[in-house]
Image (cartoon, rainbow, N blue to C red):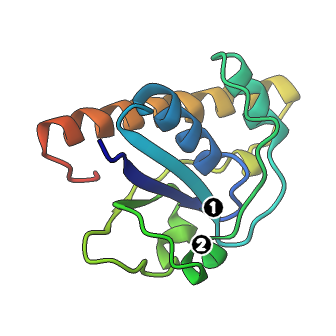
Amino acid sequence: MNKLRVLFVCIHNSARSQIAEAFLNTIGGEHFQAESAGMEPGVLNPLAVEVMKETGIDISRNTTKSVFEKYKQGELFSYVITVCDEAQTCPVFPGLRTKTLHWSFEDPSTFSGTREEKLEETRQVRDAIKEKVMGFIAEIRRGTTTGH
């Protein structure tokens, strides 16, 4: 069975898209192959790494990747899902069957306050992404993907 290829895109590929990729591969790995990339790849967010470890998923060895490199390489995806408002300007991917969806989540790199306050806000983003990924998997199984 061919897995559906999904690309998660955000501005820096440092937190939200990495979290979404990890959850889809962990929860839906038998049916999906998820990757992630950024418009302006940055550095992996240590708070994202920490809150994912709390769920038993280690993303600490992940690297940030460029969405434009994936585009130039002609990679094909069934779905390209932007997870931040800035990434809505990402390139259109080749292939007649690529569907683009948009999910908006707050950027953990913009959180302020104490370390614990930033961690708590990052946990909320993580949990919202997990819920959205689980809903996406259910929609695909039902054949009713809307993306919103």
How many C-alpha atoms fall within 10 Å of the one at disc 1: few (<14), some, or many (≥20)?
Answer: many
- 134 or 95: which is nearer to us? 95
Farthest residue in the front direction? 1
Q: Which residue is mark 1?
A: 37
Asked if labels 2 and 1 touch by Cβ distance under 8 angstroms, the answer is yes
Q: Is residue 104 left or right of residue 38?
A: left
Q: Is residue 139 visible?
A: yes
**Image spot of residue 91 (x, y percent):** 49, 81
Labelled disc at residue 20: none
Element type at mark 2? helix
**Image spot of residue 12 (x, y percent):** 71, 62
Q: Which residue is mark 2?
A: 70
Q: Is residue 103 visible?
A: no
Q: How many marks?
A: 2
- Image-quadrant location for residue 121: top right
User: Is residue 18 positioned above or below 92 on the image?
Assistant: above
Picture residue at 58% right of the left edge, 32% below the top? 126
Which amino acid lies under the numbered mark 1 shown in the image of this protein?
Ala
Picture residue at 13% right of the left edge, 37% below the top? 142
Q: Is residue 60 left or right of residue 70?
A: right
Q: Is residue 103 left or right of residue 50?
A: left
How many C-alpha atoms fall within 10 Å of the one at disc 2: few (<14), some, or many (≥20)?
Answer: some
- 70 or 67: which is nearer to us? 70
Picture residue at 35% right of the left edge, 37% below the top? 31
Element type at mark 1? strand
